[in-house]
Image (tube, rainbow, N blue to C red):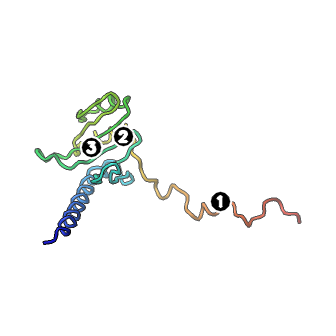
Amino acid sequence: MSTIAQPVKSRHRLMDELRREHESFRSFILPVLGPRVRVRADPREAEGWPHVPCRYGDLHWRGREWRTGEARIWVFTDRWRLISRLLAVPGVHRWQTGDREAAVWLAAEDTEAIRAVAQLLRPKVRRAPETGRSAEALAAARPRSDAPSGPQAG
């Protein structure tokens, strides 16, 4: 057995597990917050766990708890004025708080708590396709270099 084949096999297994974790997180988040919310791999971590980037923090997924099997959504914020508002939401549990940052969690099945937390954190969403301007409309609005610059004398 070659020593090179083993890491490649485990890397594929890890990618499959993370893909399943992304799908699990989406199954909890998208029905509550809508299809336009951005679910991405966390760029700050090597593993690439799924998270929802927000204006005032992040919603994170770390898989199910190994003891209870409970699905939890983790909330991280470094906005100190937001910490007391987050802790006032029913269903939000304190995990770790500092002077200017906090980590809290909530049950993934608690849709009301997810909505309330998302309203505070303001998740980043994709723009709806019908609200933006198409490439053709932008090209038509752009000034062309071959167009005359002033009124033409006739």
Judge left or right: residue 78 versus residue 127.
Answer: left
* Residue 77 in picture, x, y percent from top left: 34, 37
The earlier-in-sequence mark between 1 and 3 is: 3
Residue at 27%, 31% in the rendered image: 97
Q: Nearer the viewer, residue 94 or 131?
A: 94
- Real-space Cα distance between discs 3 and 2? 19 Å
Quadrant of the snapshot with the C terminus: bottom right
Q: Count numbered badges in the picture.
A: 3
Q: Residue at x 34, y 53 (%)?
A: 39
Disc 3 marks which residue? 111
Q: Position of residue 8 (x, y in %)?
A: 22, 66
The reply to whether callout 1 and callout 3 are in contact (CB within 8 Å) is no
Mark sitting on residue 141: 1
Around disc 3, counting alpha carbons within 10 Å, would you say few (fewer than 14), some (14 to 19), or many (20 or more)?
A: some
- Furthest residue in direction bottom, as rendered: 1
C-alpha span from label 1 to label 3: 43 Å
Q: Position of residue 3 (x, y in %)?
A: 17, 68
SS for callout 3:
helix
Which mark is first along the chain, 1 or 2?
2
* Residue 42 x/y as whole percent: 33, 50
